Image (cartoon, grey):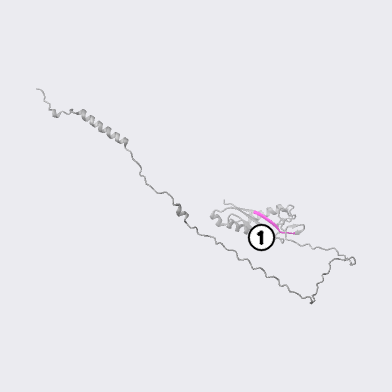
Amino acid sequence: MEPKKNPKADLTKNSSLYFVIGLFVVMLFTFVAFEWKTYDEVNDYDISMNVDDLLDEEVPMTEQIKTPPPPPPPAAPEIIEVVEDEEEVEETVIESTETSQEEEIVEVDDVVVDEIEEDVDVPFAVIEDVPVFPGCENESDKRACFNKMIQKHIGKNFRYPEIAQEMGVQGRVSVMFVIQKDGSIGNVRMRGPDKNLEKEAARIISKLPKMTPGKQRGRAVRVPFSIPINFKLQ
């Protein structure tokens, strides 16, 4: 018995046509996907500058123009008195200052000129007799002894300010002072990175003892001296 096949139930009918249609659709989508283009949104902004507005801006005047004062009036002319010819006028006789041969010449003794003492500052490096620090009287090199003793004095009286330690301030303070003609210390000046360090340096110098004054040509003079004091945190 032969099996009967319904022609409507044939699944392979028109299969090639469907394959071609599907292939065409896929190719069409692929082509459209490749050819699809997108553009960024463009915003039109007006970036032009209105120069006329800037030119019309009024600049306020910061300086007043002062007009010079008017010149002073001319001085009044002197009044000249007219003297009549009949009136007698006393004439002023001008004596001659020239000497004649008949006058005696007075001899002048030698003129003694008193020396005027001037306050002269002689630097420590060039003074003949340097100031003597207490304790250096018997030393042969008083200049070296002075420097040694003043360094010892600074180390003995040195005290780092607490506020400077808390702030982390350090540096060098240059101290300048003058050894007066009586051996005292005066005219103390400081220059440093912080006021607290300068104040401490002034305190140290103020404790210097009275010294034997320096001498130039046998006369006491003022001697400027400078020394640095270093403040360094450990």
Q: Position of residue 112 (x, y in %)?
A: 82, 63
Residue on which the image places disc 1: 187
* Identity of the residue furthest to the right in this view: 102
**Number of on-image labels:** 1
Q: Which of 139/120 is in front?
A: 120
Q: Which of 94/24 is in front?
A: 94
For the point 26% across and 33% down, the residue is: 26
Q: Position of residue 221 (x, y in %)?
A: 73, 59
Report the amino acid beneath label 1.
Asn
Q: Quadrant of the N terminus?
A: top left
Please identify the quarter of the rendering in which residue 187 is found: bottom right
For the point 13% across and 27% down, the residue is: 7
Is disc 1 surrounded by few (<14), some (14 to 19) or many (20+) residues within 10 Å?
few
Q: Which residues are magenta?
A: 220-227
Q: Position of residue 18 (x, y in %)?
A: 21, 30
Please identify the quarter of the rendering in which residue 77 is found: bottom right
Q: Position of residue 24 (x, y in %)?
A: 25, 31
Q: Mark 1 falls on what kind of element?
A: strand
- Taking the image as shown, residue 128 lies to the left or right of residue 193, namely right
- Taking the image as shown, residue 152 lies to the left or right of residue 66, namely right
For the point 23% across and 31% down, the residue is: 21
- Taking the image as shown, residue 229 lies to the left or right of residue 103, namely left
* Identity of the residue furthest to the top in this view: 1
* Identity of the residue furthest to the left in this view: 1
Magenta segment: does it hold 202? no
* Identity of the residue furthest to the front in this view: 85
Q: Which of 127/79 is in front?
A: 79
Magenta segment: does it hold 222? yes
Residue 139 vs 84, above or below: the answer is: above
Q: Main secondary structure of the magenta part?
A: strand
